[in-house]
Image (cartoon, helix red, strand yellow):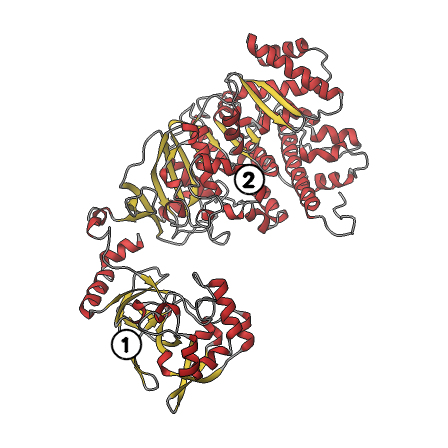
């Protein structure tokens, strides 16, 4: 279809992707055209293309009068480039038409999911998985869509409006449309029903291919479109639903106009009564410009006669100026389809009416995974809403997700007061310490604005894992309400559990029978309302003050080898005189340099060898095993923190010094790279981090740094025939509290191992 090689004969990835997207666009449009043809006359098939005139007519919606039913599916846009070339091979299109003739498209009127599944499978087979995931694209399984709709409280009021601001393949809107048709098809004529649907159910997406697929699925959900008496526009728009309204809010000059900066200058558009009028205005304007209407009055008359739109005095002059501007561009061959671009790209600005509901599954893209250009474009959004409350490139905030910005912008710009926004989002938005701090203030504060919103309910899908086999996302369904302040405890946090296994292809009614919803209460873990949520049984929640708050005990991390674990962890092999024979455990190293050095055996002094416990060695109430570790620090005085004095080590413990010196270059480089506040002029090159008086205390309460439950034990010392009775030390994957008193250590261990604390930790 198109040469995708660069000047060196190698594949140009951008060109190749564009061609794949064009191919997918062609398939969707031919499928819909095939459906339309067979609906008009079941025995008919789509005609093969004879010349470039047929090609142009087909892909611009002029074939079989398609534009008299749907007037914006075959819009001139990016992927119609091939209709404007002179050397395009028409047989490639005819081959696809022939293949599609064997596909029974009329069945889609009864079961639109047939074609919907074909579109999904085709897209997934053409688009690389890694690319889809990089863009945050995950197909939402059907039952999860129905679950989200049900839990939003949507009742299908005849005039209730819904926006999906990142609609993807349109699955939320098509499921809503099906419910709406089921409810009102007996009471409304087909044309009245469709008119209300296109007024009530709207989608935005930034991906042009997703928009084409969305429009196709939207059309399929409407059934037999040949019953339409007047043409309709599918209300799915290709636009940046997050950037456009926030940038315009900053640049707003006048409530009666929309000012839009483009690559060829500024366009000023009138604000009409609603989105549908704006669509009709720009659609008619595009037609008149492309058909060489010579005067504004000719355009104005057509708009009034066909669409019933009459300009106010102010709007008339704005519309006249726009017509003249586009006419000049067209005459200079600089206007391909500016009104269509404006209609799509700036659709978020063309609606005075906000929506009753917002629903969808926005892209899940971590800040640090976003492109540098889009980070810069959207940084002001994050900062103006206070989602980033620290430096935008701080390591802590880098865990924030783009979907956080989606929530804030959509509630701010698109949702009615007291309206509901229902989103499929990561569970970590309310649970993570490393991301979500700004998100959890639940207040829109841009430009001096102060509009609260709250979470009414959360459905935690961690155990269900609806994206199993697709992604590792920690999924939850959130319901937000605008204009209501957040209060705690929030008593509608549900943990969803499976009673029996389900498949992604299972229907919602089957899934619902196999879902158990465990109701919990939620509140911030401490006094800061932006802190992560604690979720647990409401009865335990009310007694939390006994467990939470300031503590007299301080937890610490164990010894940090700064990347050289494979050197400091050792096996004790025996004893020779007063020295201990050892070898390093090289398999515990991640450093290639240590692996290349291999196992190093030698004699060291027992004074620096200690029994060591890591996370894998800890059970509840006790240890299951232990290792040994070289700790070249004194267990008293200033040397605890500094490391054993190098001059003294050379003269008094030469064997230990020699053994360590074998790894000198590696140890020095790892100290410099990974050590906390390491100064090679002040500290010895073998110094360890997190060593202090607490390291050598006689009793310690230990627990794993990472675990699904709180399993604690008390340790003191271990006896070994080669090193004697020595205090147990820990590595950096263990947290501990150090004690001088044995009874106090067992007291704390008992509290931390209690069922109440276990519930708090799990929460």
Question: Which residue lies under the disc numbered 2?
Answer: 376
Percent position of residue 261, x then y:
61, 26
Image height check: is 348 above or below 268?
below
Instruction: Find residue 169 and report its image quarter.
Output: top right
Percent position of residue 327, x then y:
71, 17
Contact (Cβ within 8 Å) of mark 1 with mark 2 = no
Image height check: is 710 above or below 309?
below
The residue shown at (30%, 45%) is: 524
The residue shown at (44%, 28%) is: 447
Q: Where the N terminus falls, by quadrant?
A: top right
Q: CA distance from mark 1 to mark 2?
A: 55 Å
Residue 653 in view: no
Q: With 485 as the anchor, is 131 left or right in this view?
A: right
Image height check: is 409 above or below 672?
above
Q: With 168 as the anchor, is 295 left or right in this view?
A: right
Question: Which residue lies under the disc numbered 1?
Answer: 717
Viewer-nearest residue: 749 or 506 = 749
Q: Residue furthest bottom?
A: 577
Mark 2, Cα crowd under 10 Å, few <14 / some 14-19 / many 20+, is: few
Q: Residue furthest left?
A: 743
Percent position of residue 174, x then y:
50, 34
Q: Residue furthest right?
A: 87
Mark 1, Cα crowd under 10 Å, few <14 / some 14-19 / many 20+, is: some
Q: Secondary structure at mark 1?
A: strand
Residue 651 in view: yes
The disc at residue 462 is none
Percent position of residue 583, x then y:
45, 81
Image height check: is 152 above or below 195?
below
Q: Secondary structure at mark 2?
A: helix
* Label 1 or label 2, whichever comes before in sequence order: 2
């Amino acid at each position: 279809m198109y040469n995708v090689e660069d000047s060196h004969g190698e594949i140009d990835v951008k060109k190749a992707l564009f061609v794949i997207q064009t191919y997918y666009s062609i398939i969707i449009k031919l499928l819909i055209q095939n459906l339309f043809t067979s609906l008009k006359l079941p025995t008919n098939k789509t005609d093969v293309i004879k010349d470039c005139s047929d090609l142009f007519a087909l892909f611009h919606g002029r074939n079989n009068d398609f534009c008299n039913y749907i007037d914006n599916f075959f819009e001139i846009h990016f992927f119609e480039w091939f209709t404007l070339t002179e050397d395009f091979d028409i047989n490639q299109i005819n081959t696809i038409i022939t293949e599609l003739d064997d596909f029974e498209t009329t069945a889609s009127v009864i079961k639109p999911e047939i074609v919907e599944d074909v579109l999904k499978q085709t897209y997934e087979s053409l688009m690389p998985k890694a690319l889809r995931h990089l863009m945050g694209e995950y197909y939402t399984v059907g039952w999860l869509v129905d679950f989200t709709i049900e839990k939003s409280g949507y009742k299908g009021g005849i005039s209730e409006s819904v926006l999906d601001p990142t609609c993807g393949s349109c699955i939320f809107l098509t499921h809503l449309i099906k419910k709406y048709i089921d409810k009102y098809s007996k009471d409304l004529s087909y044309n009245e029903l469709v008119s209300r649907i296109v007024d009530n159910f709207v989608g935005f997406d930034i991906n042009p291919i997703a928009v084409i697929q969305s429009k196709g699925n939207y059309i399929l959900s409407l059934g037999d479109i040949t019953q339409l008496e007047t043409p309709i526009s599918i209300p799915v728009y290709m636009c940046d639903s997050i950037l456009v309204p926030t940038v315009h809010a900053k640049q707003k000059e006048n409530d009666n106009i929309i000012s839009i900066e483009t690559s060829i200058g500024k366009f000023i558009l009138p604000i009409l009564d609603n989105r549908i009028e704006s669509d009709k205005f720009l659609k008619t304007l595009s037609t008149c410009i492309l058909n060489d209407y010579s005067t504004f009055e000719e355009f104005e008359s057509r708009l009034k006669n066909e669409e019933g739109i009459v300009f106010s005095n102010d709007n008339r002059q704005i519309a006249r100026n726009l017509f003249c501007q586009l006419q000049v561009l067209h005459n200079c061959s600089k206007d391909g389809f500016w009104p269509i671009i404006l209609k799509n790209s700036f659709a978020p600005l063309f609606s005075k009416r906000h929506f009753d509901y917002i629903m969808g599954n926005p892209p899940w893209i971590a800040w640090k995974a976003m492109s540098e250009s889009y980070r810069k474009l959207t940084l002001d959004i994050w900062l103006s809403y206070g989602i980033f409350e620290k430096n935008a490139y701080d390591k802590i905030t880098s865990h924030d997700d783009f979907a956080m910005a989606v929530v804030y912008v959509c509630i701010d710009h698109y949702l009615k007061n007291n309206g509901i926004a229902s989103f499929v989002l990561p569970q970590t938005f309310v649970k993570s310490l490393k991301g979500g701090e700004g998100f959890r203030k639940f207040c829109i504060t841009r430009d001096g604005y102060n509009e609260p919103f709250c979470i009414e309910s959360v459905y935690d899908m961690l155990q269900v894992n609806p994206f199993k086999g697709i992604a590792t996302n920690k999924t939850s369904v959130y319901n937000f309400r605008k204009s209501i302040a957040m209060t705690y405890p929030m008593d509608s946090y549900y943990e969803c559990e499976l009673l029996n296994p389900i498949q992604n292809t299972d229907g919602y009614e089957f899934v619902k029978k196999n879902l158990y919803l465990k109701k919990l209460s939620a509140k911030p873990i401490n006094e800061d309302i932006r802190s992560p949520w604690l979720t647990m049984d409401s009865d335990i929640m009310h007694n939390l003050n006994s467990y939470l708050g300031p503590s007299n005990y301080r937890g610490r991390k164990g010894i940090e080898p700064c990347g050289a674990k494979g050197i400091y962890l050792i096996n004790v092999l025996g004893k020779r005189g007063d020295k201990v024979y050892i070898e390093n455990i090289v398999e515990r190293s991640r450093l290639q340099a240590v692996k290349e050095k291999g196992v190093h055996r030698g004699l060291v002094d027992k004074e620096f060898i200690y029994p060591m416990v890591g996370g894998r060695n800890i059970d509840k109430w006790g240890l299951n095993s232990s290792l040994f570790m070289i700790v070249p620090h004194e267990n008293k005085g200033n040397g605890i923190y500094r490391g054993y004095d190098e001059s003294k080590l050379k003269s008094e413990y030469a064997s230990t010094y020699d053994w360590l010196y074998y790894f000198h270059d590696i140890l020095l480089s790892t100290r410099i790279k990974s050590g906390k506040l390491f100064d090679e002029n002040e500290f010895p090159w073998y110094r360890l981090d997190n060593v202090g008086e607490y390291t050598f205390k006689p009793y310690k309460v230990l627990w794993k740094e990472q675990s699904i439950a709180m399993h604690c034990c008390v340790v003191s010392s271990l006896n070994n025939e080669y090193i004697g009775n020595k205090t147990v030390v820990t590595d950096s994957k263990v947290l501990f509290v150090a004690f001088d008193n044995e009874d106090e250590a067992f007291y704390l261990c008992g509290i931390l191992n209690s069922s109440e604390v276990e519930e708090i930790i799990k929460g």
